[in-house]
Amino acid sequence: MSTLKIENLVAGIPGKQILNGINLTLNSGEVHAIMGPNGAGKSTLSGVVMGKPGYVVHSGSVTLDGVDLLALPAWERAQAGLHLSMQYPTEVPGVHLDDVIREAYASRGRNTSTLDAEIVAEAARIHFDMALVERSMNVDLSGGEKKRNETLQLALLKPKFAILDELDSGLDIDALRDCARRVEAATQEDNLGVLVITHYARLLEELRPDVVHILAAGKIVKSGGPELADELETTGYAGLTQ
Amino acid sequence: MSSLAHYPGVVMPTVEEEIWRYSRIEELNLDTYVAGSVVNHVDAPSDVASIVTQGAAVGECGVAMPIPVDAFAEINAIHCSGAHADIITVKTARGKSYASPVVITRTLSVSGVLAAPRLIIDAAENSEVTVVEHFLSSDDISSLIAPVVEIRAAQSARVTYIAINELGNKTWKIAHQQSLGERDSTTRLFTVALGGDYARVRTEARLVGVGATTQQVALYFADKTQMHDFRTLQTHIAPRTSSDLLFKGAVQDTAKSVYTGLIRIEHEAHGSQAYQTNRNLTLSHGAWAESVPNLEIETNDVKCSHASTVGPIDDEQRFYLESRGIHPDIAERLVVLGFFNEVLERLPQIDVVSGLRAKVAAKLHAGAQ
């Protein structure tokens, strides 16, 4: 079993502290949801943990099975077993999904000989149109197609831990169900640990969390079981963060 | 300005002239070259063999450029009527489409020469042809090539021309491409520039017939101390003509590139559309690229747009690939090849083109293995 551990993480962008001491421990096979209002620091948390340029870490640590992730560049964090499904996946013109996955496999020393078949099988599982696989990465894809594409990459790369940053934003109900179910399956088939960041409880009806954390003003103000998400639906953030 | 000893009446340009601004023209001393020739190899399968003439007469010149547009076009014209004349013509038959491309390889194999070959593509009404002109020299050849290609597409003719520059890194190239599109014709001018020390192309598509269409597309990639220099003109003379230009370049090490482009829509050319896009990647801190788009519109009722960018690889794109566990050098290589894919995908899929992607990849430091 693997563990992703965030301890006393204080971070932000230059001149502005956004995360004010985050603590969270996520084990293989678990699903933790981080919910919070706009501006709580949800996307900052995913960016800082994955190593996106532009963020500053002031103190605290993020470790994966004891490995200090904050000391590694993004690509080595990914190789250590961390994955980020982005809220707004970046367009990379002229670069196709299979080019990316082939290089990602090669960098992990994985065999690429059956890659094409794996892509076809995984695309079918989440109803991702194979014609879109031939497109430039995220170029001219709808919101739902982009998230299916993100989920397809997650399924192929089989990381130890995945951060899903607002997987549900801009997603139609069918795509939401396909993506959420595929991630749920990975928690069982591959023992994937998931940190699902979301504004709305809707996603959590498909991807059932073991633990729900409420993030407000850069701190986790409350943690609990799935019932916390339901409570949020009735009280709103104002009721929980006071 | 004094005339040149070998070429009476020809006056060398200076960087004071806008169209030579940023160029390296003032490094050039023509007195250090003697008139010379390239070695030609023409690959024309049986269906196109009969339309190619090597060693054509000077009278064939002028189908698209009746008057030389600058000093180097003048030098080319002087060569055409002299001892080093090198004129190849491709003349299609009316209504005929040729499946095989004509592939002309021009190799500079001697140092210290100025070679000025001319290619004339004269496409008769409703005919279709593809011609490749491939320029080669090895890295030890220090010479100057000043080629001219003239293209005339008669009514409804479709001409595709592809220039590939794989010259050695001591060779200079100052080239002209001039096309003339008559009614409802389609002319496509592609350039792939990987080689040369200073390599310049002035490319002008003139749309003289109603409904004529043209595309000008280029990929250029300079490294070390190379400089690529493009001057493009989209000249709309007749009504309802359309032009589309896409030039994408990258510079690495201390290489330089210049793009200046002019869309000119003349008084009679109403109902025309013209698009111009130039994008440049600067892959090293010491590399430099300039992009200057221009519009000159003399009539109403036209659609025009231009876009131009110069900058390093986008951080977000690099991060996206790195977040998949891809090493930064390989991520950069993927982004650059992806950037050029837009051009490579537009090129006709013929043998000489299929190896170009690998040649671009081989030139990239990033991810070199």
Image (cartoon, grey):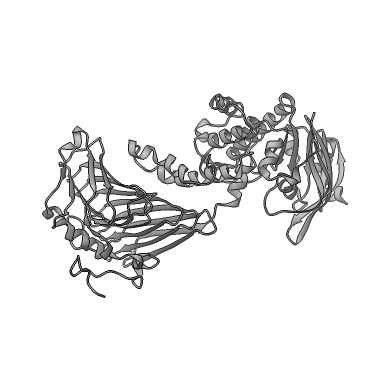
Q: Could you tell whether B205 is left or right of B291 in the image?
A: left
Q: Could you tell whether B115 is left or right of A66 in the image?
A: left
Q: Residue at x 52, y 35 (%)?
A: A132
> Is there any visible trace of residue B310 in the rendered image?
yes
Relative to B353, say whether B117 is above or below.
below
In which quadrant will I find the N terminus of chain B?
A: bottom left
A146, B178: nearer the viewer: B178
Give the image location of residue B195, x and y in percent: 38, 50
Give the image location of residue B255, x and y in percent: 46, 57
Relative to B192, say whether A115 is above or below.
above
Q: Could you tell whether B262 is left or right of B8 in the image?
A: right
Give the image location of residue B330, x and y in percent: 56, 42
Relative to A125, say whether A107 is above or below.
below
Q: Could you tell whether A218 is left or right of B122 in the image?
A: right
Q: Which picture quadrant has residue B225?
A: bottom left
Q: Residue at x 11, y 55 (%)?
A: B59
B199, B66: nearer the viewer: B199
Residue at the far bottom: name it: B1
